[in-house]
Amino acid sequence: MFRVLIAAAAAVLLAAPAASAATPAATTARPAATTTFSVDCRTTAAIKPDERAAVEGLSTTLFQRLTAGQMDTAFESLAPEIQRSVGREPFGKSLDFVRGIGTWGAPRVTRTYLLDVAGEPPEETTSCEGSDGLPEAYVAIAAFPRQAHVTIEADVAGERWGFTSWLRFKDGRWDVYAIDVRNIGVGDLGAAEVFALARTQRSREHLMSAWLLYRAARALAGRGDYLSLPLRTEIEDEIRDWDASLLEPGELPIFWTSGRITYGVQDSVVAGLDGKPWIQLQRWTSVWAGEREIKAENRRVLAAFLKEHPDWAESFSGVELKTVHPDGRQTVSTLYTPARGYYEVGK
């Protein structure tokens, strides 16, 4: 079985409250009849400059510390109870993940949400509306009088990554309550553009490409457990409403045959190559017959895939099949593009 990865994303939650919060949903927190509660969410332009500078400055500084590998100073930015809950060593491993992604470009603050909360929130999320009165985001809330969510973007290795932080104000200072880091775009393609590609492929009844692109769009629209975009809800609703005979909830029911072996897609996340959308198939093998045999088998499998799904080239730049050694320390990749044909990369 293979795992299919599309266009480039991974996610890691660096810190989270000890009490888990539900993923923000498309519902606004409303007070119960017997509860005195209110929440005011101000978006970027409506926040006072000094307040905005404080939360955006802390989030940007934390981003710079994480991407520079400054584990001690980054860890000290977390709320004390989060430090105790997460622990320094697990936090350091998450930092290794961030640094291992590549060389990070300059951070860009994209959205800031400042919330004033009175009383005990009866819900775990609330909506923050833009100037048009429509929801811009659904954000997690907790029983802190003042809290904020800041989203930052940065480019790395031809991809666009998102850094989302949840902050709270306590004892006269802002500190970090939760962090999420994940891929949100490949080259010039973000969630909205990939969503449009998925709809196009669906209209043409190219089920494999459409399914992969829907999954990629959903992943790229994600911002973690504490902030959710309306676009992600729209994508998820459309996936659920897609009544295709070949599609089962949560599964990709596309199979193809190479010789006497039938291959199928086991799972999918978002991945990519050189800042362009690629289909990447990943195979784990229990028998390593040698690099030469692995390359030959890779080409046979890729040829079967390309024959079964000729429409892939309408949305993707190439296809890669990566076979992983049983010990996980060696891989052999066979790639295909229309211009170059088959070629291999090993490490």
Image: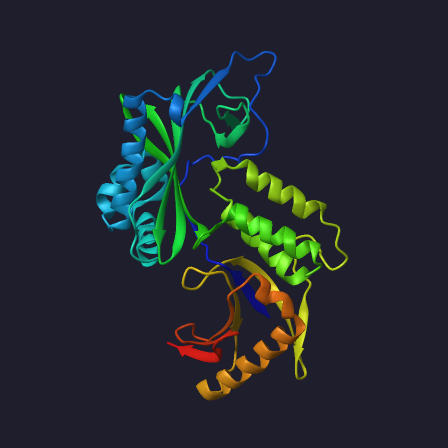
**Residue found 62% across the figure and 44% down from its top:** 236
In this rendering, position of residue 280 left or right of residue 83: right
Judging depth in this view, the residue of 184 and 323 nearest the camera is 184
- The relative height of residue 20 versus residue 244 in the rendered view (above or below) is above
- Is residue 341 among the parts visible in the rendering? yes
Q: Is residue 193 above or below residue 52?
A: below
Q: From the viewer's perspective, tell me whether residue 34 is left or right of residue 113.
A: right
Please state if 181 lies on the left or on the right of 121 as rendered: left
Residue at the far front: name it. Answer: 339
Q: Could you say where residue 175 lies in the image, as x and y percent from the top left?
A: 31, 31
State the scheme by which the image is colored. rainbow
| Viewer-proximal residue among 238 and 1 | 238
- Comparing 228 with 320, the one in front is 320
Residue 96: name its quadrant. Answer: bottom left
Q: Which image quarter is the N terminus in?
A: bottom right
User: In the picture, which quadrant includes the C terminus?
Assistant: bottom left
Residue shown at 39% from the left, 21% from the top: 46
Q: Is residue 55 left or right of residue 30?
A: left
| Residue that sits furthest to the right in the current view | 245
The x and y percentages for residue 272 are 46, 61
Location of residue 109 in the rendering, given as x and y in whole percent from the top left corner: 35, 37
At x 71% / y 57%, what residue is drawn? Answer: 247
Residue 201, given in percent of the width and then of the height, sits at: 65, 57
Residue shown at 66% from the left, 48% from the top = 239
User: Number of callouts in the render?
Assistant: 0
Could you tell me if residue 14 is visible in this image? Answer: no
